[in-house]
């Protein structure tokens, strides 16, 4: 039976498990990446594991998210990550060097290898045929410490591209078209694998744009073949030695197949407030634009920005529009400053930002109240741009540049002839923003400024637990309700004690004081407890506050995994009506927990205050039980000899 590219890489890197969709497997990790926003926690976790060296071939710590330094907190985080990188043998990318995914694609991506990154857009490197997966911070720390990553083997969805692109239509339009077709849930449980003669139309950076937004489809990752286009890209980057050819077998087996004719695609836009709310630009009339933002890990490549510069050359940004450009890497910025394109952009009236995530993560450039912002980014959720009532449209760089000139959301194909962009024979690499680890690292210490606090580590699970119900919540509690994240709290991502003051802050005052006074305790939840993001802090902060178990009607999948990783028991009511038998500050206890988990038996929760007993169940793998018994994934990994 023929194999897909995805399964060829999984098979090459398989460590444990039976490689079949749905089975739990572990794979060898070749590379990792972190960004600063999640990275501080990753390196605190690495510190807590007390390892000497990392096990990956190559790991990189990027600073690209919280680059504004209006107080000491972000600067402290940068210094901490820099010192941890030096100690453990990790490459450090200084602020200003660029956006992690664009930089990783340019400098380190390798066809056929596995990359795990603590950022959801890690799949960008799928553009060169690298199996690149976004994961939780703890998974990335363990990938560095142990060299492995556990996942459920995904299914593979093949998207065959045929035909030729129309003028002014580019990779962003293709992925928006796919989002319109499949929706934001369409990729869940799948690796998306591209094939077909239409691939010849797409450069590696085009492919990376599409792989990047596979995250918006909910896919585990996306992957392209490594072909002559890939070889050309790596050669121009001065990395021909990293090229390996990689194709699916002719008779490769896929779980699902879709065919797309590139010629059917027109310039597209995702309207507010979802990346799959997509229509053709030409169908929207006269939408006046206040801001145009070009950049992000989706569309900040040399080609993207050169296209924009060519469109703007000799023209003027509309007087009502603020045009913002953030390049993907320092090398791109350097090349554009040398070839005059930067001068063309400045001459047109564009504002040039440093090479970083910037407006994408809400670090500056929030639009005005009720403003309309066109962005080449990947997400347009309400409020993400920093202005709650702003409306964000996602577009291609071509549509963005033309609209910045006209002042209206404009179909670029009405704009005359499309300018061509020539890619230089050799990329002019800007290497001085990278700090490579030294050979002799034995006396190096990690620098922890006052904003950096140690990672909370749980203790092994007790056979018997007792305490108070500290909080009872309703259905659909989100990770935002548990641990809010906003611009005010972002600088404290490495300071769990400080963050704990805001735990459940939208629902109840001073939860942290209640938890501390009672020496920790239990939470009672309704349906779908912990829905929303994969934010680890929503489990780590309760761990810090001594939460021993969350007992709910049901759990959101990722949050449940984060609770297990933190050593907090996620237990479900066997009879959902039993939820009604508990109130805040009731005294509860459960006995024989480890024994029950080992036997796959129910656990009895006794409400001492009300003199009632109810049955609870735990659903999880044998490995989950071992992790809980050890008091979390970090402890489990410490004793795991693999
Ligand atoms: Fe940065 Fe936005 Fe991408 S925050 S990593 S540019 S999604």
Image: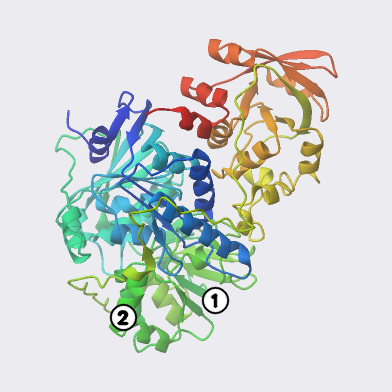
Where is mark 1, residue-wise?
A: 290
Indicate whether 83 appears above or below 417: above
Where is mark 2, residue-wise?
A: 310
Judged from the image, the secondary structure of the residue bearing numbered disc 2 is helix
Give left or right: position of 185 versus 230.
Answer: right
Instruction: Give the label on residue 584, or none.
Output: none
Question: Where residue 101 sits: x, y (%)?
Answer: 38, 57
Where is residue 164, by image quadrant? bottom left
Question: Where residue 287 sits: x, y (%)?
Answer: 51, 72
Give left or right: position of 93 versus 471.
Answer: left
Give left or right: position of 190 versus 496.
Answer: left
Dot 1 beta carbon under 8 Å from ligand 1: no
The residue at the point 45 percent across, 73 percent down is 354
Where is residue 229, by image quadrant? bottom left
Where is residue 296, by image quadrant? bottom left
Indicate whether 6 appears above or below 210: above
Judged from the image, the secondary structure of the residue bearing numbered disc 1 is loop
Indicate whether 12 appears above or below 107: above
Task: Measure how far apart labels 1 and 2 are at the Cα level.
Answer: 22 Å
How crowded pointer 1 is (Cα within 10 Å; few <14, some 14-19, many 20+) is rated as: many
Q: In this rendering, does residue 277 appear at all? A: no
Q: In this rendering, does residue 473 appear at all? A: yes
Question: Where residue 192 sits: x, y (%)?
Answer: 32, 43
How crowded pointer 2 is (Cα within 10 Å; few <14, some 14-19, many 20+) is rated as: some
The residue at the point 85 percent across, 19 percent down is 609
Q: Give the number of marks.
A: 2
Please state which of residues 617 and 519 is positioned toward the viewer in this rendering: 519
The residue at the point 65 percent across, 56 percent down is 489
Please state which of residues 140 and 129 is positioned toward the viewer in this rendering: 140
Please state which of residues 573 and 241 is positioned toward the viewer in this rendering: 241
Which color mode does the image show?
Answer: rainbow
Please state which of residues 499 and 530 is positioned toward the viewer in this rendering: 499
């Amino acid at each position: 039976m023929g194999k897909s590219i995805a399964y060829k890489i999984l098979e090459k890197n398989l460590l444990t498990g039976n490689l079949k969709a749905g089975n739990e497997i572990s794979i060898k990790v070749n590379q990792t990446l972190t960004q600063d926003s999640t990275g501080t926690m990753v390196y605190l976790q690495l510190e807590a594991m007390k390892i000497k060296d990392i096990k990956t071939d190559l790991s990189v710590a990027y600073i690209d998210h919280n680059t504004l330094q209006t107080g000491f907190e972000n600067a402290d985080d940068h210094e901490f990550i820099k010192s941890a990188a030096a100690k453990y043998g990790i490459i450090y990318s200084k602020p200003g060097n660029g956006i992690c995914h664009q930089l990783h694609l340019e400098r380190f991506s390798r066809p056929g290898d596995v990359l795990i990154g603590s950022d959801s857009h890690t799949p960008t490197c799928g553009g060169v045929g690298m199996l690149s997966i976004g994961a939780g911070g703890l998974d990335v720390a363990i990938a560095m410490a142990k060299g492995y990553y556990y996942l459920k083997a995904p299914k593979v969805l093949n998207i065959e591209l045929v035909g030729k692109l129309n003028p002014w239509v580019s990779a962003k339009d293709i992925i928006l078209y796919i989002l319109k077709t499949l929706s934001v849930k369409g990729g869940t449980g799948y690796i998306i694998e591209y094939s077909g003669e239409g691939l010849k139309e797409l450069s590696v950076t085009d492919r990376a744009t599409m792989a990047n937004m596979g995250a918006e489809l909910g896919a585990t990752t996306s992957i392209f073949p490594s072909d002559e286009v890939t070889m050309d890209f790596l050669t121009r980057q001065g990395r021909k030695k990293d090229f390996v050819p990689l194709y699916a077998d002719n008779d490769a087996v896929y779980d699902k197949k879709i065919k797309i004719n590139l010629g059917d695609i027109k310039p597209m836009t995702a309207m507010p407030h979802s990346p799959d709310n997509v229509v053709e630009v030409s169908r929207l009339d006269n939408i006046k634009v206040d801001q145009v933002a070009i950049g992000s890990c989706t569309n900040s490549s040399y080609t993207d920005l050169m296209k924009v510069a060519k469109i703007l050359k000799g023209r003027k940004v509309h007087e009502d529009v603020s045009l913002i450009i953030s390049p993907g890497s320092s090398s791109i910025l350097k090349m554009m400053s040398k070839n005059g394109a930067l001068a063309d952009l400045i001459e047109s009236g564009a504002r040039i930002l440093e090479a970083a995530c910037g407006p994408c993560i809400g670090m500056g450039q929030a639009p005005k109240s009720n403003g309309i912002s066109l962005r080449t980014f990947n997400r347009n959720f309400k409020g993400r741009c920093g202005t709650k009532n702003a409306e964000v449209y996602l577009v291609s760089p071509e549509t963005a540049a033309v609209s910045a000139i006209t002042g209206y959301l404009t179909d670029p194909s009405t704009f005359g002839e499309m300018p061509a962009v020539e890619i230089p024979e050799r990329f002019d690499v800007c290497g001085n923003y990278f700090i490579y680890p030294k050979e002799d690292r034995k006396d190096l210490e990690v620098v922890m400024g006052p904003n950096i606090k140690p990672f909370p580590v749980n203790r092994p699970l007790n056979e018997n637990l007792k305490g108070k119900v500290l909080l009872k919540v309703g259905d659909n509690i989100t990770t935002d309700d548990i641990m809010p994240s906003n611009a005010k709290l972002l600088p404290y991502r490495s300071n769990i004690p400080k963050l704990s003051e805001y735990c459940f802050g939208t629902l109840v005052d001073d939860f942290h004081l209640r938890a501390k006074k009672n020496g920790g305790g239990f939470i009672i939840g309704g349906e779908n407890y912990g829905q929303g993001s994969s934010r680890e802090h929503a489990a780590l902060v309760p761990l810090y506050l001594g939460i021993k178990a969350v007992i709910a009607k049901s759990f959101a999948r990722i949050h449940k995994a984060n609770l297990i990783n933190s050593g907090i028991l996620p237990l479900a009511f066997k009879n959902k009506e039993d939820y009604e038998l508990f109130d805040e500050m009731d005294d509860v206890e459960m006995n024989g927990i480890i024994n029950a988990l080992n036997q796959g038996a129910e656990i009895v929760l006794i409400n001492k205050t009300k003199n009632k007993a109810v049955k609870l169940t735990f659903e999880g793998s044998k490995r989950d039980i071992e992790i809980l018994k050890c008091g979390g994934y970090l402890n489990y990994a410490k004793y795991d000899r693999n």
